[in-house]
Image: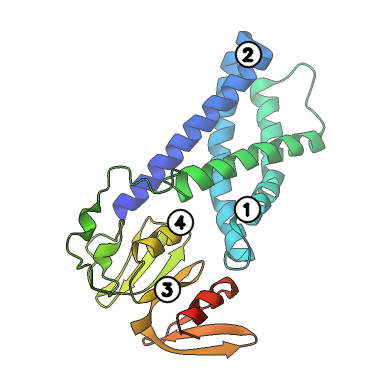
Amino acid sequence: MQSLRSNIQLRYGAAIIITATLMIWISVNEEGREAIPGQVAFWSVAVTAGWLQMILIARGVRASFGTERWPGLALLFATAIIGAAPLTFEVRWLLDIIVAPPEGLPPPWLTYLNVTVINLVFCLVQYLLIERWPIIEGADFGETAEHLQDVEPADHRPAIGRLSRKPDGLSGTIRYMRMEDHYLRVFTDEGDGLTLHRMKDAARDLAGTDGMQVHKSWWVSAAAVDQIRQENRKRIIKTTDGTDIPVGRSFETDLRAAGWL
């Protein structure tokens, strides 16, 4: 878990450096080299503060809106728009203190629009570089197929060894998996743990086993299913350990074809 958090922190650090460098480069090209000292100070502080706040705002938006009910792009736009409100006041204060433009500050509404656009860039960088890494589909960045060596081809059990990115120290047969922000929590018959992995990639790793993805945030094995009930037009899977797992409507067709429904 510590290595995962260190990995995420390194990616956020890289994202801050990349976006700050980009904004400094744009500003210097627009205003000339005499603006370098002030622009470097302004954008270094503004981008760092902006990233830290946007991380918290993004988590608040996801918790309030619900990642199961809203697509990622909708939450991204909501984060950019909501986060621009407090950042507008901070950016105007930093402009006045550090840059002190001789023509004065722009109107607040124009600052808000500019901050919203920058926030969209921040959100896209966070989504692509941090939450959906690797960007290149199918790339493993140094990881190999060694995780499959101990898995028999004819074995349809969802052994944890099938995952290309599995939680450190966790073994056993997978019962179900759940997305937690950009982490994947894997539950096996021997415990649970977190790994930095996308659900669709994990589902692909487990293709051919006796389990299925039942929701964009959930995957469950057939052996872990106790019953499937319907509540207010929504289907719920109850596992043998009592966990309730929602079934996404877009997955019902595949579940019905597999004989689950």
The vertical placement of 127 against 19, above or below, is below
Q: Residue 166: x and y, percent?
A: 29, 60
Specify few, some or many for label 4: CA neighbours under 10 Å numbering under 14, 14-19, or 20 or more: some
The CA distance from mark 4 to mark 2 is 38 Å
How many tags in the picture? 4
Please give left or right for residue 9 compared with residue 261 in the image: left
| Residue that mark 4 sits on | 182
Residue type beneath disc 2: Ala
The CA distance from mark 4 to mark 3 is 20 Å
Residue 44, visible in the rendered structure:
no
Q: Residue 153: x and y, percent?
A: 23, 67
Residue type beneath disc 1: Leu
| Residue that mark 1 sits on | 73
Q: Nearer the viewer, residue 125 or 115?
A: 125
Q: Nearer the viewer, residue 250 or 125?
A: 250
For mark 4, give the secondary structure.
loop
| Residue that mark 3 sits on | 212
| Residue that mark 2 sits on | 35
Of tags 1 and 3, which is closer to the observer?
3
Please give left or right for residue 174 compared with residue 243 in the image: left
Of tags 3 and 2, which is closer to the observer?
3
